[in-house]
Image (cartoon, rainbow, N blue to C red):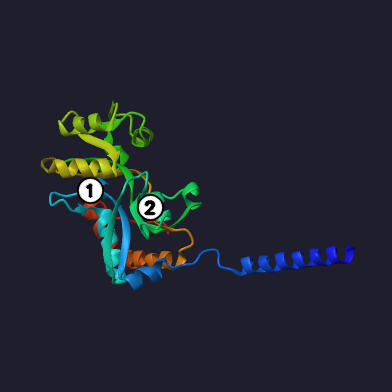
Amino acid sequence: MRFLTLRATIVRIASALSLGVLIAGAPAHAQTALDDVLARKTIQIAIPTDFPPYGFVGTDLKPQGLDVDMAGLIASKLGVKLELVVVTSANRIPYLQTKKAELVISTLGKNPDREKVIDFTAAYSPFFQAVFGPKAIAIKSPADLAGKSIAVTRGAIEDQELTRIAPAGADIKRFEDNNATVSAFVSGQTQLLATGASVAGNMMARNPQLSAEYKLLLKDSPNFIGVGKGEDKLRLRVNDIIAEAKKSGELDRMAMKWLGRPAGDLPQ
C-alpha cells in the first residue's frame, strides 16, 4: 500500500513539473493585433472628441484635431482603413484592454501605474502649459514678461511654473477657474494668457480675431500612443511610423497646425 501511495505521489509530481514546463515555455501573450489589423485591412483607433485641439467635432460634425490626424497618418502608413472609436478620459484605457481599439491616441501621458496595464509607443506630440498672446506682443524669454499682465488659473500647474520664472515686474492676475481666466484674456483685461495647450487651442479657434499665438513654454508633458500590453509587433511598427514622421517633419507640421508650435524633441 505504501509503495502504491509513493508511486502515485511521484506521478503527480512529474505531471505537475511537466505542466510547469509547458506553461513556462508558452508565450505570455499572443501578439495578434498587427496581424489582425493587416488581415482585416482596418484599424480601430480610439480618439477624443471633447478635447480641442487634439480631438473635437468640427462644423461638418466630423472628428478633427491633432490626435485624429495622427490616427489617419498611422492608418495610411499601414495601408489600412481607419475606424475611429470615440472615447473619454475615463474609458480610453479600458477600451484598449477589452480590444475595442488597437491603439489609443487621446492625449495619453505615460506613468508607472498605466505602464502596468498597457504599453506605450514613443511620444508623438507635445502637451504643454505655455504663455499665449497676440502676435503684436513679442515674448522670447521670461524677462519679456516684465511689465505685462498675465491671466492664469489659481493653483494650476501653469500658475506654479509662471510664478517660478516670472520676473518681479510681471503682473500675474489669478482667476478661480479656466473659464474665468480665458474670459479675462479674451475681454482684454490682461495682455497675455498662461494655460494648457488644449484650453489655449480652443480659445484661439473660437476667437480668431485676437490673433493669439504660442509665446513661451512653461512645462512640457508629451503625449504617447497606448498599445495593448505585450503587443510588441504593433508597438514597434507604430514607433517606426512615428520616427519616419519625425524625420520628415510631419510631426512638427501637425503640431504647428493645431498647437501653434513644433513638436520639437520628443522622448522615445
Q: In which quarter of the image is the N terminus?
A: bottom right
- Which residue is more in the foreground, 223 or 84? 84
Comes first in the chain, label 1 or label 2: 1
Q: Which residue is drawn at 84% across and 63% down?
A: 5
- Which residue is more in the foreground, 37 or 189? 37
Q: Can residue 10 be seen in this view?
A: yes
Instruction: Give SS at disc 2.
Output: helix
Q: Name the quadrant containing residue 206.
A: top left
Instruction: Give SS at disc 1.
Output: strand
Q: In this view, does 51 lie to the left or right of 235?
A: left
Location of mark 2 (residue): 95
Marking on residue 56: 1
Q: Can residue 125 be seen in this view?
A: no
Percent of width and height locating residue 159: 34, 33
Determine crowd level at label 1: few under 14, some 14-19, many 20+ residues with C-alpha closer than 10 A. many
Q: Which amino acid does label 1 sit on?
A: Phe
Q: Which amino acid does label 2 sit on?
A: Tyr
Percent of width and height locating residue 190: 20, 30
Q: Which residue is drawn at 40% across and 55% down?
A: 96
Percent of width and height locating residue 184: 20, 29
> Going by the picture, which residue comes out furthest to the right?
2
Q: Quadrant of the C terminus?
A: bottom left
